[in-house]
Image (cartoon, grey):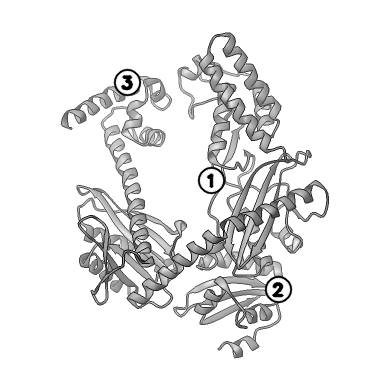
Amino acid sequence: MFKEKLSLVPRLPGCYLMKNKDNIVIYVGKAKILKNRLKSYFNGRVTGKTKKLVSEIVDFEYIVTSSELEAFILEINLIKKYDPKYNILLKDDKSYPYIEFKNEKYPSLVVKREININKKNKMLFGPYPNVHAARRLVNLINRLYPLKKCDKTPKKECLYYHIGECLGYCIHKDLDTTNLRNDIISILNGHDEILINKITEKIQINSDNLNFEVALELKNELDYIKVVFERQKVELNDGINRDIFNYYYENGYISIVAFFLRNGKLVGNKKNIFPLIDDIKETLEYYIVNFYSKKNLTPKEIIVPNILDIELLNSVIDTKVTTTTKGKKKHLFDLAGTNAKINLENNIEMEYRNNEKSFDASRELGKIIGIENLSVIESFDNSNLFGTFTVSGMVTFIDGSPSKKDYRKFKISKEQNDDVGSMKEVIYRRYQKALLNKTRIPDLILVDGGINQINACKSVLDSLNLKIKVCGLAKDDKHSLSELIDGDTLISYKIDKKSNVFYLLTRISDEVHRFTINYHRQIRSKGSISSILDEIEGIGETRKKELIKAYGSVKKMSDADIEELEKIIPHNVAINLKEYLENWNNNKQNKE
C-alpha cells in the first residue's frame, strides 16, 4: 500500500517517522539511505516486534538531512519530542549511583543517584553497581575519617566529635584536612591498600582498648571490602576510566552488556535485554548515545563493537570512542560479549513469556471493548483521609507492561471527600496539559469505580473534545476485581479469573492503588509535620522545610534527640520542639 510513496523516497540520509491510524508517531528511526531502510519494513520479511510495529503503520514521513551525523542528532531530538511507544522499548530509565566528594573548606561525602553531568568542578566517583554498595563505602569512610557529617555548621559540637568521627569543624576553625582529603580521594580512585590498612589499624586500636564489638564490626567491613576488591581483580593496570560495550543477538532479542572500569579496575556492569526493532548497528548506536545523554558521566574511553560508526559516535559523545582487536582490552571486550550471551540464554524464555503474555492480554482486552490494537492504557485512583490530604495517581501500561516514567502524581486543590470532584479535576489537568503540549493520548482510560466515576471522566473529556475510551473497574465485597464496565455502552463484562485479561486488569488496579497510596502517605506525613511545626515559635518556612526534608515523618522527628535537632534549629527552639512532640505523642496515645 506504500509502493507509490516509497518510490519517491530519495537515496539520502535522514530520519523517518512511522504513524498509526490516529496519526500518532509510534516509531522514529534514522538511516544512511532512507529509501533502502523504509523499503525493508514493507518487504514481508519482518518478524517479532518489528512485525507488530509494521502492522500498526498506516503512514510515514521522512526528513532528509545532509549527513548521517545530522540524522542521528535529529533522531534523538524527535524521540524526545514524540516519545514513540516503540522507541521506549530501548529506554532504560535507571540512573546509577555516584559518590560525590564535596571538596569544600570542610570536606564531606554524599551518595547521588541523580547527577548534573553538565556541572563542572564536581568530584564524582562511579558509577557504582548499586546504591547499597555506594552507601556502605561512604558510611565506612565516614567511620574511618573525621569528615564533616552535618549539612549546616552548628554552633556546638555533636556526638560525632565526641566519638572521634568528626574534627569539630563547628568549633575549631582553619583545620588542616590535606592528608584526609588525599587519602579519601586516593581510596575513591581505587587505591585499595589505603582503605584496607586504615581498617586494619582501627581494628587493632579498638581491640587494644577492649572495644571488641566495634572491632568485630570493622572486621566484617574488612571482609566485605576484600570480597568487593577480589571481584575487581579483572583490570588493565593503566589507571584509566573506560566503559566497554558488547552484545549478543538471537531470535529477535538483543542483549547488551556494559563493563565499567574505573582507574583500570572493573567495578560494575549493566545488563539489558530488548526486543530488536531496528537493525543491530542502529540499535547499539542509539543505546550508547542515550546512555550518556543525561544520566551518566562520560569516561575517558569507550570501547564498542567494530560494526558501529566510530566517527559518528566520536562526533556525538564528548570522549574517545574506539574498538579493540588484541590484548587485555580485547579480552575484556570478549568477556562482555560472553556475559551478554549468557544473560540472553538465561532469560530469553522469561522475556518471551512476559512479553507475549502482556501483549496478548492487552490485545484481548481491546477485542472485548472494541479497540483494535489496544496499546496505551492510563489508569487513575484517588486517596484521602476523611477529606484531607486528597491526592490522585496515574499509572501507564504500554502493550501490557508498566511504563513507570509515565506515572503521574496529582495533589487535589480542594480538600474534600469527593471522588467524583477529584476525578473531574485530575482528568482535566492531565488531558488539558496533553493537548497543550501535544503529547501522547492513551487508547484507554481506566477508572477505579463505577458509573459515577466513568461519567465524571467522560464529561471532562467531552469538554476538551477528546474521544478516548473510558472503562471502570468494579470490585466485589472482598475488594477483588469483579467486572469491567464499558463507558460507552455501560455493559458490564465478567472477566474470567484464569484469563490473561484478568491478570492484566488486576495488575493495573493493584499498581495504581499502590502508587496512589504511597503518594498519599508521603503527603499526609509531610502535612502532619508541617502542621506541628507551625505551632513552634522560632520555626519559620525555611527551618520548616529543612526539618521536613531531614526527617520526613513525625515519628522520625520524635525519635531525634536535641543534639540532632540542633543541627538544623537553635538549642532553645529544639528544646521547645522536643517538649511539644512529647506532649503531642502522649495525647495521641491517650486518644487511641
Q: Which SS class for mark 3?
A: helix
Q: Which SS class for mark 2?
A: loop
As measured in the structure, the alpha-carbon distance from the residue carrying label 1 to the one carrying label 3 is 35 Å
Q: Amino acid at mark 2?
A: Lys
- Reply above or below: 302 against 152: below
Q: Residue at x 67, y 66 (%)?
A: 280
Q: Amino acid at mark 3?
A: Ile
- Numbered circle sitting on residue 32: 2
- Reply above or below: 551 against 249: above
- Numbered circle sitting on residue 575: 3
Q: Position of residue 352 (x, y in %)?
A: 53, 64
Q: Dot 3, how many residues are within 10 Å of its Cα: few (below 14), some (14-19), or many (20+)?
A: some
As measured in the structure, the alpha-carbon distance from the residue carrying label 1 to the one carrying label 2 is 35 Å
Q: Nearer the viewer, residue 149 or 310?
A: 310
Q: Dot 1, how many residues are within 10 Å of its Cα: few (below 14), some (14-19), or many (20+)?
A: some
Q: Dot 2, how many residues are within 10 Å of its Cα: few (below 14), some (14-19), or many (20+)?
A: some
Q: Nearer the viewer, mark 1 or mark 3?
A: 1
Quadrant the N terminus occupies: bottom right
As measured in the structure, the alpha-carbon distance from the residue carrying label 3 to the one carrying label 2 is 70 Å
- Give the number of callouts: 3
- Residue 270 shows up from this direction: yes
Q: Position of residue 549 (x, y in %)?
A: 40, 37
* Left or right: 127 as drawn, with respect to 556: right
User: On the image, numbered disc 1 is attached to which residue?
Assistant: 114
- Reply above or below: 283 against 57: above
Q: Earlier in the sequence, mark 1 or mark 2?
A: 2
Q: Position of residue 219 (x, y in %)?
A: 58, 22
